Image (cartoon, rainbow, N blue to C red):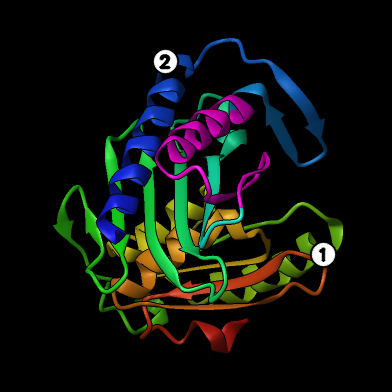
């Protein structure tokens, strides 16, 4: 059953990624322009494609997505971000991905996670009880334990209060680490932690579909993820994900 879910998630992620590659750099239809965000018609199209593939295999499964919910009331719930890094995509910056996870709808136990970067042809996969993989090869978080050696990404959220908190946190962290990066995709940030490219990721205000697959990857690769309700927007979360050895929490 778990491998069937993983195969389906991989198939759906690759299908959505192909659509994104085909449309990358073209004129895009914008559904909504927000102050710190953009909603594309392509987001909706990719989620519909992913949902159709999943529901063809498991018609009773529930789908929770950034672009809306669908499906039935079966025991499995899928958590889908069709384009994580939409603003990057809109500006033709090739750093975005498809993020798909599945969990038990009752117990919330994670079952599988897939993150696919269609521009780099990188596919991260994880299944319950199995190692995290990148293009089929096992991966581990970095061993770095000193802030002075670390590469850390800090996300900046979409409200003024969350931005202000992010700025203060960024200053505390940036003075201590080797380098900071702001990349624009939460899912890829966590995938990068899982394979040792980054050491930590912090953001004040994030949604479940941004990090569900990434959390599985980081933890399966030996890292740690701390989630708690955001103090700035109901229904979102504060996240700190790291390699498990870096003392990042001391600077939050």
- Residue occupying the point 37% across, 74% down: 219
Of the numbered discs 1 and 2, the one sitting upstream in the chain is: 2
- Residue occupying the point 68% across, 15% down: 29
Quadrant of residue 86 within the rendered picture: top right
Image coordinates of residue 106 in percent, x first then y, are 57, 72
Q: Is residue 27 above or below residue 130?
A: above
Q: Quadrant of the N terminus?
A: bottom left
User: Per the image, is 96 magenta?
Assistant: no
Q: Which residue was labeled with disc 2?
A: 22
Quadrant of residue 215 within the rendered picture: bottom left
Q: Which residue was labeled with disc 1?
A: 233
Q: Is residue 124 above or below residue 129?
A: above
Q: Quadrant of the C terminus?
A: bottom right
- Does dot 2 land on a helix, a strand or a loop? helix
Image coordinates of residue 187 in percent, x first then y, are 48, 53
* Magenta extent: 43-72
Q: Residues within 10 Å of mark 2 (few under 14, many from 20)?
A: few
Q: Is residue 74 above or below residue 11?
A: below
Q: Is residue 146 above or below residue 65?
A: below
Image coordinates of residue 177 in percent, x first then y, are 45, 73
Quadrant of residue 110 within the rendered picture: bottom left
- From this viewpoint, which residue is outermost toward the top? 27
Residue 152 marker = none
Q: Nearer the viewer, residue 87 or 150?
A: 87
Q: Nearer the viewer, residue 169 or 245?
A: 245
- Mark 1–mark 2 distance (CA, rounded to whole Å): 35 Å
Q: Looking at the image, do the residues carrying marks 1 and 2 touch, with CB atoms under 8 Å apart?
A: no
Q: Residues within 10 Å of mark 1 (few under 14, many from 20)?
A: some
- Does dot 1 land on a helix, a strand or a loop? loop
In the figure, is residue 227 to the left or right of 123?
A: right
Q: Nearer the viewer, residue 203 or 39?
A: 39
Image coordinates of residue 2 in percent, x first then y, are 30, 60
């Amino acid at each position: 059953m778990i491998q069937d879910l993983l195969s389906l998630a991989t198939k759906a992620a690759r299908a959505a990624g192909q659509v994104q590659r085909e449309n990358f750099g073209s004129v895009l239809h914008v559904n909504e322009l927000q102050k710190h965000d953009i909603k594309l018609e392509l987001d909706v199209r990719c989620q519909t494609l992913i949902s159709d593939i999943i529901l063809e295999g498991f018609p009773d499964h529930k789908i929770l997505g950034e672009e809306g919910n669908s499906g039935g009331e079966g025991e499995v719930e899928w958590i889908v971000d069709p384009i994580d890094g939409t603003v990057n995509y809109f500006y033709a910056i090739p750093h975005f991905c498809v993020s798909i996870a599945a969990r038990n709808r009752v117990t919330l136990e994670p079952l599988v996670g897939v993150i696919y970067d269609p521009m780099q042809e990188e596919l991260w996969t994880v299944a319950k009880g199995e190692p995290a993989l990148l293009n089929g090869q096992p991966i581990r978080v970095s061993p770095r334990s000193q802030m002075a050696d670390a590469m850390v990404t800090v996300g900046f959220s979409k409200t003024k209060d969350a931005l202000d908190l992010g700025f203060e946190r960024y200053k505390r962290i940036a003075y201590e680490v080797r380098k900071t990066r702001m990349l624009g995709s939460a899912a890829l940030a966590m995938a990068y932690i899982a394979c040792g490219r980054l050491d930590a990721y912090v953001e004040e205000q994030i949604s479940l579909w941004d990090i569900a697959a990434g959390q599985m990857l980081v933890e399966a690769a030996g890292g740690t993820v701390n989630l708690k309700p955001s103090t700035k927007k109901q229904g979102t979360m504060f996240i700190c994900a790291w390699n498990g050895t870096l003392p990042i929490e001391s600077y939050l």
